[in-house]
Every structure is written in C-alpha cells, then in structure tokens.
C-alpha cells in the first residue's frame, strides 16, 4: 500500500509518509480526527478553535484561527504536513503555506458518506490503516442505526440557521444538510446561489418549513434565542448541538447516534 496514490480535494496526489510526521491541523474536526487516528503525538500545531480532545490539545501550539492562520507561527513549527479544508480555511493562506510546507492535504467533505474517504485518505498518508478501518466500521454501524430510526418517521422540512444579523442558513449540498437529511430532516431552501445563503424571515420558501433546528454553533444560539426565533418563524424550534451536525471525521460517528436519539424523541 506504500505506493498507492491518495488524492485530496484539490486533486493533489499524496503517498504514504515514511518518516515521523509533524502535523499542523487548521480545522477543529480534523484535529480531533488526527488524534483519533492515533496521531496525537505527531500533532505540533492547531487553531484556537481546535478544542477536542481538550486534555491532549492543551499543550499543542496554536497557529491562530481557521480564517486568520499565522503563517509565521506555522513556519516556525516546521511541519511536514498541514491539513486544511476548502470551506474552513482561506485559499490565500493555504496557497501561501504550500510554498514552505512539503505536504498540504486539503479536504472538502460535503456528504455524510465522504467521511469514509476522509478516514482512508489520512489513514493512508500517515500509515494508520487499522485505525481508519476501525473508524469506518463504527461509522457504518452508526449510519445503520440512524437509517433505522429515520425510516420509521415521516420526513420533515427544516430551517437550520447558522448566523444571526445577517440571518444565514445552509444549502442542500453542504455537509450539515447531508447529516440532517440522513436523519429525515430536509433543509430549506432547496436551491440557493450561495452554499451559505442569507435569508429574510419573509422569504416565500419559509412557508414550507415545518421546524427550526437552532444549533449551538457557529453562531452561539442559546436558550434566550428560542423565543425570538419561534416568534419570527412561527414554527416549533428545537435546540441542537452544532458540533454533532457540522463536525465531520471521527465526530460523525457519535454525531449520527446523537441525531438518531434526537430524531426519535416525541415532537
């Protein structure tokens, strides 16, 4: 398997790394996945938003945020690999990093099933095939559990706000929408020009919304927003853990089980 080519989201070719990698992760869910692949000891840098697993990351250097990566700090860590995401990180920063880091791996999961390819990609690059297979098996079991729950219930059209002032939501070709669809929750709007469109509360398509799912991130919606959103939407509002829906990688496994439990609750 050492000669097998592994292709990232930019179409760049990678091979199994034979040395001792020094990894910088620019995405919280990727940082968690790196650790769950048994590579915590090879992680030398992460963003300030990379908080899981908390105890392990406490001693790992921060390189700024997902959108404002400090290139000088990344350079000082002398990484062999930087792992980034098309949606999460700025293109100019990633291209700048490519100038001085030998291996930059860029991912872009857009569906729940893309997690399997992600496990195989990072597991293959870093020689953690058994750990990747373990995650894939857990993912398959969790997917089946959620599918069984969703099959017993009618599908429901939902609104999933991700920001307030301006109000923003997700298009159906996003990872979040794919996770929700696996649970039988179909996001609206069905079509939009942008993947994360702004919306107004008088938009005609809102008439088709049956429920609002109010997440804990990226905007920190809290219980005090329930009344506001309920009044604006005139629909039932359900609080939802945003990490469990938007974090891909190893978090997808408990995320699928979380959605199965949430979906199975009485309305």
Image: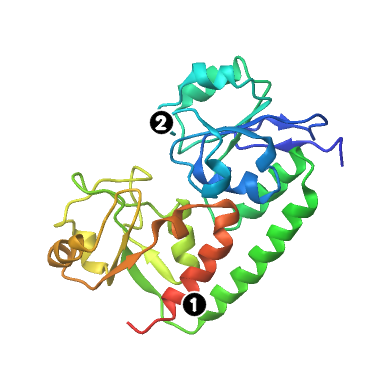
**Horizontally, is 137 left or right of 167 in the view?**
right
In space, the residues marked 2 and 1 are separated at their CA atoms by 35 Å
120 relative to 6, above or below: below
Q: How is the image coloured?
A: rainbow
Tally of numbered tags: 2
| Residue 264 pos. (x, y %) | 44, 81
* Residue 77 position by quadrant: top right
| Residue 50 pos. (x, y %) | 49, 42
**Horizontally, is 154 left or right of 135 in the view?**
left
Q: Nearer the viewer, residue 14 or 209?
A: 14
Instruction: Identify the residue at horizontal 44%, vertical 72% (top origin).
Output: 184
Q: Nearer the viewer, residue 5 or 36?
A: 36
Q: Secondary structure at mark 2?
A: loop
Q: Which residue is mark 1?
A: 150
Q: Nearer the viewer, residue 214 or 45?
A: 45
| Residue 152 pos. (x, y %) | 49, 84
164 relative to 21, above or below: below
Instruction: Identify the residue at horizontal 62%, vertical 73% (top origin).
Output: 144
Q: Which residue is mark 2?
A: 67
Category of crowding for the residue at label 1, using alpha-carbon neighbours closer than 10 angstroms: few (below 14), some (14–19), many (at least 20): many
Residue 264 appears anywhere in the view: yes
- Cβ–Cβ below 8 Å for labels 2 and 1? no
Q: Nearer the viewer, residue 62 or 121?
A: 62
| Residue 259 pos. (x, y %) | 47, 70
Residue 109 appears anywhere in the view: no
């Amino acid at each position: 398997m050492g000669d097998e080519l592994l292709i990232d989201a930019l179409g760049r070719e990678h091979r199994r790394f034979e040395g001792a990698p020094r990894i910088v992760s620019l995405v919280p869910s990727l940082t968690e996945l790196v650790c769950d692949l048994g590579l915590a000891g090879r992680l030398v840098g992460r963003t300030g938003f990379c908080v899981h697993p908390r105890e392990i990351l406490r001693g790992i250097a921060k390189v700024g945020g997902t959108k404002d990566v400090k290139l000088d700090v990344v350079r000082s860590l002398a990484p062999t690999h930087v792992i980034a995401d098309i949606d999460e990180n700025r293109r100019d920063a990633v291209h700048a990093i490519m100038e001085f880091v030998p291996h930059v791996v860029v991912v872009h999961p857009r569906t729940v099933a893309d997690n399997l390819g992600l496990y195989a990609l990072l597991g293959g690059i870093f020689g953690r095939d058994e750990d990747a297979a373990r995650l894939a098996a857990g993912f398959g079991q969790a997917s089946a559990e959620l599918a069984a729950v969703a099959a017993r219930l009618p599908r429901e059209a939902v609104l999933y706000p991700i920001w307030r002032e301006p109000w923003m939501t997700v298009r159906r070709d996003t990872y979040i929408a794919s996770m929700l669809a696996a649970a039988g929750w179909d996001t609206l709007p069905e079509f939009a020009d942008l993947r994360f469109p702004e919306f107004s509360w008088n938009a005609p398509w809102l008439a088709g919304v049956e429920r609002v799912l109010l997440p804990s991130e990226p905007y920190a919606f809290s219980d005090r927003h329930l009344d506001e959103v309920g009044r604006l939407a005139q629909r039932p509002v359900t609080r939802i853990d945003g990490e469990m829906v938007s974090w891909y990688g190893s978090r997808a496994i408990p995320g699928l089980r979380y959605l199965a439990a949430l979906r199975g609750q009485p309305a």
